[in-house]
Image (cartoon, rainbow, N blue to C red):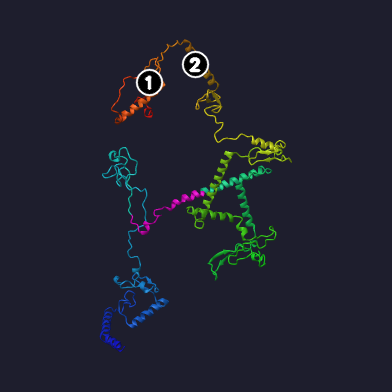
């Protein structure tokens, strides 16, 4: 510790003391050079630059206090304007690089202002000069010098002003503006407010026409009432609603303010320990009414929640419903528009789950409109489905009603029916009117799943109503072609005439036909070879010849089985020849592969 104290004193004596004296000398010399009795040492710009003694600094503080208190005049800037003494020093003192000699607030103002900025706008449609002859470099179409032919907005001429030297268009007034920051972004820049008078006139004309129309309607109603005082004039539902609203407005206006009690009173909501916020709230309960928690003081009666001020159950369930005016909060939740609001919420949730961007709290109007469209589309689908079913199966309710004598036909006799509705027992002895209807209903012919009684191509009978010569046809025209067009009785007569003519031609041909020459029938062998008529084949010998032919063919297939001592017989009988012909392979025969 002693070493640290000795080191600190050493540094203060040898380093800091000479440095302090040197800096004081510099500041003193600077204050002597800048000292001017006529200048104000309290200037804001030079206060931090020039050295001030303790006395000068004290005087400066006293002067500032006097200026803030209003005892001394305010300081003036370069332009002779007063400077507010309450401005903080970091705002009033100018930066050192500005070299401000006198107090000023120019460094806080917009000192880069450009005087070329303007708020003027283009003079639309203004013309400058109209030449009499075409000038070199002007528009070839209209002759104006301010644009070329590519940017010309006039109608293209057949021959431009360059070649005709006539009808030279005047030069447009070209202006260039250098707008400031606000002028470039001003969406109403160049707008003439006088043009808005047209919009006001249009709206006034519309209101005047509306008032005139309403007045005419009222006069017309008065005339109808005066002309027909005894008859009741039919009024549409919308007009009745309008009249009811007008009467309600009148009645509400006639109500005395004393009877309305505190309905129109607006109280300010204050913060409480339990929360809440500022604002206004209307007191919508008349103070003469009994609070719902005081209707029934029984402890076991309906529960009252003081936090939410709700009482769901009925506090007086045994009282006359016509006399009590409060039946619990659940009564209001299940009546009136509360159910519609619940359905609207449920529809919004379901629509959101199915991908619709709907939110009841964020966009209630959109959710309500979507729900209305949903109900309209649903009603249309229900109506369409109902019409489709009625069109297909019919509507028994719309048909003629059955007489009461048939419906109320009663008897004490017993009749038994099976599951299909057929009478099992008691039919002969119990023939009431109702049972007769059941019998008629049972004997009705069943309809098949195929189309019945469909007449096509102008036929009056169905296909299959006529049968002749193992062919079906139409009975109306006796045609056997399914897609033929009905010819009626004329077609039947023509068909009969054609049949008679064909029969007559066949008979005439048979009468005139000569007898044909007899054809000789030859007794052909198996494969068409001519065989004499007197040849008689023995069946046993033929069977032996067939066996021999099979053996010979086997030997031809496998020559190794052929014996050396073969006997050759040149004698060929008719049976052998027939067997050879029967076993011979014919290459043109389509059944050759199935012979063996």
Quadrant holding the C terminus: top left
Residue at the outermost right position: 412
Q: Is residue 459 visible?
A: yes
Please identify the residue farthest to the front as the structure is shown.
565
Q: Which mark is residue 448?
A: none
Q: Nearer the viewer, residue 429 or 176?
A: 429
Q: Residue at x 56, y 32 (%)?
A: 452
Classify residue 369 as left or right of residue 52: right
456 or 546, nearer to the observer:
546
Q: Does 194 appear in magenta?
A: yes
Q: What percent of the width, then of the height, locates residue 358?
A: 49, 54
Q: Is residue 401 visible in the rendered structure shown here? A: no
Find residue 503 and report its horizontal and vertical position in percent: 50, 15
The furthest residue to the bottom: 2
Front residue of this view, candidates 232 and 94: 232
Residue at x 55% of width, y 31% of height: 454
- Give the left or right position of residue 388, taking residue 537 as reference: right
- Give the labeled residue for mark 1: 575
The magenta stretch spans residue 202: yes
Determine whether, in the image, residue 162 is placed left or right of residue 466: left
Mark 2 lies on residue: 502
- Secondary structure of residue under mark 2: helix
Q: Position of residue 292 (x, y in %)?
A: 64, 64
> What's the magenta region?
177-204
For image coordinates 67% across by 36% down, the residue present is: 439
Q: What element does badge 1 sit on? A: helix
Q: Nearer the viewer, residue 261 or 366?
A: 366
Rendered-image quadrant of the N terminus: bottom left
Q: How many marks?
A: 2
Q: Quadrant of residue 66?
A: bottom left
């Amino acid at each position: 510790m002693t070493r640290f104290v000795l080191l600190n004193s050493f540094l203060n004596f040898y380093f800091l003391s000479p440095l302090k004296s040197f800096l004081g000398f510099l500041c003193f010399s600077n204050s002597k050079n800048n000292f001017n009795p006529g200048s104000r040492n309290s200037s804001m710009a030079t206060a931090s630059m020039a050295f001030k003694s303790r006395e000068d600094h004290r005087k400066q503080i006293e002067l500032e206090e006097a200026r803030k208190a209003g005892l001394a005049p305010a300081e003036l800037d370069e332009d002779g304007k007063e400077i507010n003494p309450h401005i903080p020093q970091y705002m009033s003192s100018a930066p050192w690089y500005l070299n401000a000699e006198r107090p000023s607030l120019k460094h806080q103002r917009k000192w880069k202002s450009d005087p070329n900025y303007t708020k003027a706008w283009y003079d639309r449609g203004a013309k400058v000069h109209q030449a009499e002859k075409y000038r070199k470099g002007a528009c070839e179409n209209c002759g104006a010098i301010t644009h070329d032919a590519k940017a010309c907005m006039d109608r293209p001429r057949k021959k431009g002003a360059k070649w005709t030297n006539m009808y030279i268009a005047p030069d447009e007034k070209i202006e260039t503006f250098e707008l400031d920051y606000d002028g470039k972004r001003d969406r109403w820049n160049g707008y003439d407010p006088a043009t808005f008078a047209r919009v006001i006139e249009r709206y006034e004309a519309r209101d005047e026409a509306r008032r005139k129309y309403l007045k005419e309607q009222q006069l017309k109603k008065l005339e109808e009432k005066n002309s027909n005082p005894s008859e009741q004039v039919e009024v549409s539902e919308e007009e009745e609603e309008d009249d009811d609203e007008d009467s309600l407005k009148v009645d509400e206006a006639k109500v005395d303010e004393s009877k309305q009690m505190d309905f129109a009173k607006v109280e300010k909501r204050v913060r409480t320990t339990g929360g809440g916020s500022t604002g206004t709230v209307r007191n919508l309960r008349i103070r003469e009414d009994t609070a719902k928690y005081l209707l029934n003081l029984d402890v076991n009666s309906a529960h009252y929640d003081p936090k939410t001020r709700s009482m769901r159950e009925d506090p007086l369930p045994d009282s006359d419903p016509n006399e009590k005016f409060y039946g619990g909060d659940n009564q209001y939740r299940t009546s009136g528009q509360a159910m519609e609001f619940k359905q609207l919420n449920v529809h919004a949730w379901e629509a959101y789950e199915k991908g619709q961007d709907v939110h009841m709290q964020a966009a209630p109007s959109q959710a309500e409109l979507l729900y209305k469209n949903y109900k309209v589309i649903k009603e249309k689908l229900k109506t369409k489905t109902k019409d489709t079913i009625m069109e297909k199966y019919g509507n028994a309710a719309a048909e003629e009603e059955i007489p009461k004598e048939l419906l109320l036909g009663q008897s004490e006799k017993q009749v038994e029916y099976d599951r299909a509705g057929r009478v099992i027992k008691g039919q002969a002895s119990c023939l009431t009117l109702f049972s007769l209807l059941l019998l008629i209903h049972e004997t009705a012919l069943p309809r098949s799943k195929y189309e019945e009684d469909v007449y096509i191509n102008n036929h009056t009978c169905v296909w299959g109503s006529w049968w002749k010569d193992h062919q079906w046809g139409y009975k109306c025209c006796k045609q056997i072609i399914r897609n033929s067009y009905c010819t009626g009785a004329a077609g039947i007569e023509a068909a009969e005439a054609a049949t008679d003519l064909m029969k007559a031609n066949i008979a005439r041909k048979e009468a005139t036909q000569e007898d044909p020459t007899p054809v000789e029938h030859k007794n052909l062998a198996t494969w068409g070879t001519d065989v004499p008529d007197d040849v008689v084949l023995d069946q046993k010998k033929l069977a032996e010849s067939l066996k021999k032919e099979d053996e010979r063919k086997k030997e031809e297939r496998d020559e190794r089985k052929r014996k050396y001592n073969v006997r050759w017989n040149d004698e060929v009988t008719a049976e052998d020849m027939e067997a050879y012909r029967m076993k011979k392979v014919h290459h043109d025969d389509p059944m050759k592969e199935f012979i063996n």
